Image: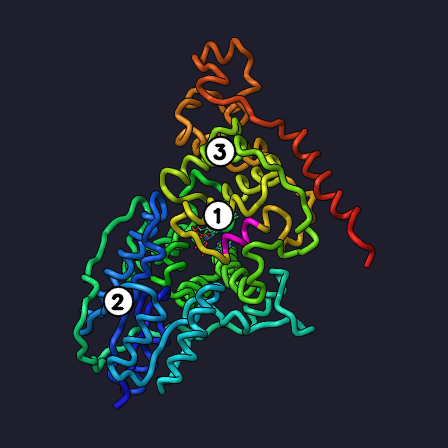
């Protein structure tokens, strides 16, 4: 009799999960397990909120398994040690898990695979976390894709398989032990609940109402125009294959843009898989010699949302309060940190990853290196976002800024993204003391832009001729 263990790490669902469906279809007796790694549970602040999201996700996975007559076993400790002990103790013949693309996870899985095989256990690594395995596509020269558009074309020419429902008629192994308590949270701080049925319901609503205009509305932070399922995708509570096929079936500009965004997620995953060094080194190595500024006061002002640029400050305060930031704002604040304050992208990347509820190594490093012009962006390094014009374009009536900066509530629209342009009498009439109620800009964008260009140009001039 084959005794299969399904090890859940991310991909915390049973819908469209190859690692769950295959052993059931092969008639194996199965058990399901998660390992709670103490290393990742000691954080505070948003790290703690992320741990909560994970706990919600495994609670709802446990509920889904219970509805099929099973349970979710819980091990505490170092994952590789715990899993290998479990395999030996319970005479497991096969272990199944979804593939991992983060460098630490790849190392851990290689160790588990080698040692499990020594125990005589068959190891099955399934492709479930992304649309495609990160090694699926390479360019004509055999290299991984470093430009998004050709990557997207290649993916769309070979779609991932259609999603499959969770199997029923499961033969469960009877193994005693601590289990995850089944729970189905209904709401998480403005996010859709962290369970598969709620997330699909939310997505179906998004498809019925918002996806048609997604290509236009996705840029406005005051509008609820995006799917807000990035944390669910990160934990694998939803299947990216199901979202992709549902969006493709709708068609139109909005759905097609949505599909592109899903593919950006795969794009950055394959970059991280092929270039694990990009967590700390620049994707384009030439920029490793950039000399960033070291200004603790500027870094704190950026983190705390007191730079004097309203769109930046509102975004950072939203992040600090809720663990969420709109994509347009992520681009603006990342550009501001790297191109206005000239601070190393790695500082912003680490801050985002510890504060975002959807913090994801591949997408975050990809997004930061894109914004800092050290990554895969096809645009040249001299693109610098202007925080005032970006604010005016994407938050034209200042609705987003006013939500997070109540001190600017009464500022007229024409000054909302540049309150320092108000005259003393205008500010006095509005009862705002600039520099006291709200900071004056800590840097001058025009001056800093030139400094950024100089900083990048210096590197290009000192580069060895090839
Ligand atoms: C500096 C920076 C840092 C970022 N850090 C993260 C991060 O840690 N985790 C994360 O999930 N996303 C990150 N992103 C990408 C993007 O901002 C979020 O995925 C998006 O805002 C999530 O909102 P949504 O689910 O409503 O997205 P939607 O607009 O509904 O998009 C659908 C899905 O596509 C994926 N997606 C969309 N845009 C991107 C993108 N640019 N790169 C990769 N995937 C994308 C997400 O999984 C998203 O849920 C970052 C972007 C930037 C510029």
Residue beneath disc 2: 75
* Quarter of the image with the N terminus in it: bottom left
Question: What residue is drawn where x is 41% and y is 22%?
Answer: 407
- The mark nearer the N terminus, 1 or 3, is 3
Q: Secondary structure at mark 3?
A: helix
Please identify the quarter of the rendering in which residue 94 is found: bottom left
Tag 1–tag 3 contact (CB < 8 Å): no
Q: Is residue 317 shown above or below 268?
A: above
Q: How is the image coloured?
A: rainbow
Of the pair 31 and 238, the residue shown nearer to us: 31
Please identify the quarter of the rendering in which residue 122 is found: bottom left
Q: Is residue 14 shown above or below 1?
A: above
Q: Is residue 451 magenta?
A: no
The reply, left or right, for residue 107 in relation to residue 17 is right
Q: Which residues are the magenta region? A: 363-368
| Outermost residue toward the right in this view | 465
Of the pair 78 and 109, the residue shown nearer to us: 78
Q: Secondary structure at mark 1?
A: helix
| Outermost residue toward the bottom in this view | 1
Residue 350 is tagged as 1
Question: What residue is drawn where x is 41% and y is 54%?
Answer: 230
The reply, left or right, for residue 259 in relation to residue 324 is right
């Amino acid at each position: 009799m084959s005794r299969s263990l399904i090890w859940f790490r991310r991909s915390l669902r049973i819908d469209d999960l190859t690692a769950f469906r295959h052993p059931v279809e092969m008639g194996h007796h199965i058990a399901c397990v998660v390992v709670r790694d103490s290393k990742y549970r000691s954080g505070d602040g948003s790290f703690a909120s992320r741990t909560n999201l994970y706990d919600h996700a495994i609670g709802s996975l446990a509920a889904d398994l219970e509805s099929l007559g099973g349970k979710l076993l819980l091990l505490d400790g170092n994952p590789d040690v715990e899993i290998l002990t479990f395999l030996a103790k319970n005479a497991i013949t096969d272990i199944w898990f979804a593939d991992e693309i983060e460098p630490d996870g790849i190392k851990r899985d290689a160790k588990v695979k080698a040692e499990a095989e020594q125990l005589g256990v068959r190891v099955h690594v399934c492709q479930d976390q992304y649309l495609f395995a990160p090694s699926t596509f390479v360019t004509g020269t055999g290299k991984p894709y470093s430009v998004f558009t050709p990557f997207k074309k290649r993916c769309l020419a070979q779609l991932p398989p259609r999603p499959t429902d969770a199997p029923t008629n499961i033969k469960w192994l009877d193994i005693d032990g601590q289990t995850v308590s089944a729970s189905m949270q209904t709401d998480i701080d403005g996010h859709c609940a962290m369970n598969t049925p709620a997330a699909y319901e939310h997505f179906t609503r998004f498809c019925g109402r918002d996806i048609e205009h997604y290509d236009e509305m996705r840029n406005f932070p005051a509008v609820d125009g995006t799917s807000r399922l990035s944390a669910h995708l990160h934990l694998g509570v939803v299947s990216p294959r199901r979202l992709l096929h549902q969006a493709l079936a709708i068609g139109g500009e909005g759905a097609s843009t949505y599909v592109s965004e899903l593919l950006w997620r795969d794009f950055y995953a394959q970059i991280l898989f092929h270039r694990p060094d990009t967590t700390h080194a620049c994707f384009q190595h030439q920029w490793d010699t950039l000399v960033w500024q070291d200004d603790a006061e500027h870094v704190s002002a950026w983190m705390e949302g007191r730079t004097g640029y309203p769109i930046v400050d509102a975004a950072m305060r939203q992040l600090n309060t809720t663990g969420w930031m709109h994509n347009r704002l992520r681009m603006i604040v990342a550009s501001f940190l790297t191109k206005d304050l000239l601070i190393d992208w790695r500082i912003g990347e680490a801050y985002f990853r510890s504060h975002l509820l959807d913090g994801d190594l591949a997408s975050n490093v990809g997004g930061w290196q894109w914004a800092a012009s050290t990554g895969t962006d096809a645009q040249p390094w001299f693109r610098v976002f202007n925080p005032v014009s970006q604010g005016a374009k994407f938050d034209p009536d200042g609705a987003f800024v006013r939500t997070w900066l109540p001190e600017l509530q009464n500022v007229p629209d024409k000054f909302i993204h540049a309150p320092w342009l108000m005259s003393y009498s205008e500010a006095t009439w509005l009862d705002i003391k600039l520099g006291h109620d709200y900071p004056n800009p800590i840097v001058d964008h025009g001056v800093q832009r030139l400094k950024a260009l100089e900083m990048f140009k210096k590197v290009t001039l000192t580069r060895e001729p090839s």
